[in-house]
Image (tube, rainbow, N blue to C red):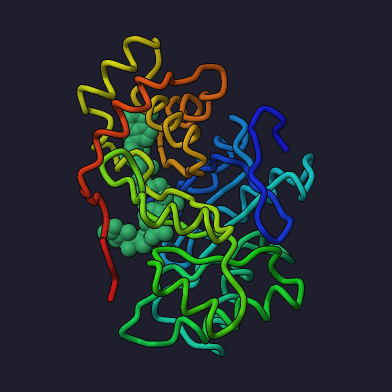
Amino acid sequence: MNPSVPRALLADGSSLDVIGYGVYKIPPEETEQLCSTALGAGYRLIDTAALYGNEAGVGAAVRSYLSSGERDDLFITSKVWNDDHGYDATLRAFDATMDRIGLDQLDLYLIHWPVPSKGLYVESWRALNQLRADGRVRSVGVSNFQEDHLRRLQDETGVRPVLNQIELHPYLQQRALRDFHAENGILTQAWSPLGRGTALTDPVVGDIAAQLGRTPAQVVLRWHLQHDILTIPKSSSPERISSNLDIFDFSLDDGQLAALDALDRDQHSGSANRD
Ligand SMILES: NC(=O)C1=CN([C@@H]2O[C@H](COP(=O)(O)OP(=O)(O)OC[C@H]3O[C@@H](n4cnc5c(N)ncnc54)[C@H](OP(=O)(O)O)[C@@H]3O)[C@@H](O)[C@H]2O)C=CC1
Ligand SMILES: O=C(O)C(=O)[C@@H](O)[C@H](O)C(=O)CO
């Protein structure tokens, strides 16, 4: 555990760091080194997925960390990809992920997208809950689920995800879904929390960064933090990896928060859906 990073409590009793390191688009051959850099900078949560093709690199960095660190200090997330929906296919995909990562137990496993056209996400959800009952994963959740998908999981299985990972940044604030999460004990974790860089050149963000003597990325990540939104920024630069974590010794005042809140424009930086 890194005591300087606050943790958030999941409804199943586990907890996770409010900020982690995302590795989408990091090439497999660079993943071990960059994850080790992130761990060295103080990150303890790493977000990967079968889709990213770099789970083995995450696992190599984790094993290197464990030569002197504690397993319980780390929090590793992965996700079942859209091709592997269905009960048995999801169990097989999980086994393959664990073979690549090389851990006995995963901290969080997510359904990457609901893919409603396939109609199989409820079966995948049953598989995730079986993996949790078997002790192979500590927490189970989803990603890119809308309110109707979340309601269906609850209605058909009686079990809610503890977390929904969705695209969220100042240009896409997802207020209705965040409210639904809050009412239902589901934590919100932002993917593309920097809007893949788009939000960083906004003049409002730049002005606040200048007022505070901070980087635009720190301002945006602090905005998430003050709204209880978990983040997993990606960077391939050791300096930016480190500075993105340095958000706990300043705060945005009400006026700065309101100015950032006013940037919402329903603008996606990634896929809006994967039907
Ligand atoms: N569940 C899902 O469907 C999805 C999940 N994700 C997860 O979310 C993570 C983060 O999302 P991602 O799409 O990568 O986008 P981010 O919003 O994290 O933005 C990453 C981009 O911002 C740049 N950047 C990072 N830090 C800084 C900084 N301090 N100053 C300037 N530029 C910066 C990076 O460039 P550089 O590397 O050069 O620093 C990169 O181009 C992913 O890695 C993945 O783990 C992402 C997409 C979908
Ligand atoms: O945003 C995109 O266009 C993508 O390809 C990604 O979001 C991808 O779908 C994904 O889920 C990464 O986690």
Image quadrant containing the N terminus: top right
66 relative position to 267: left or right: right
Residue toward you, 265 or 15? 265
Q: Where residue 166 appears, x then y in whole percent?
A: 40, 56
45 relative position to 2: left or right: left
Q: Where residue 205 appears, x then y in whole percent?
A: 28, 24
Residue at the image point whose x is 49% and y is 52% from the top: 188
Snapshot quadrant of residue 223: top left
Image quadrant containing the C terminus: bottom left
Placement of 100 over or under 119, stated as above or below: above
Residue at the image point whose x is 61% and y is 37% from the top: 39
**Residue 244 in sight from this viewpoint:** yes
Residue toward you, 113 or 64? 113
Snapshot quadrant of residue 157: bottom right
Residue at the image point whose x is 26% and y is 15% from the top: 207
Q: Where residue 5 appears, x then y in whole percent?
A: 64, 32
Residue at the image point whose x is 36% and y is 55% from the top: 176
Residue toward you, 65 or 255? 255
96 relative position to 29: left or right: right
How many numbered badges does the structure rendering display?
A: 0
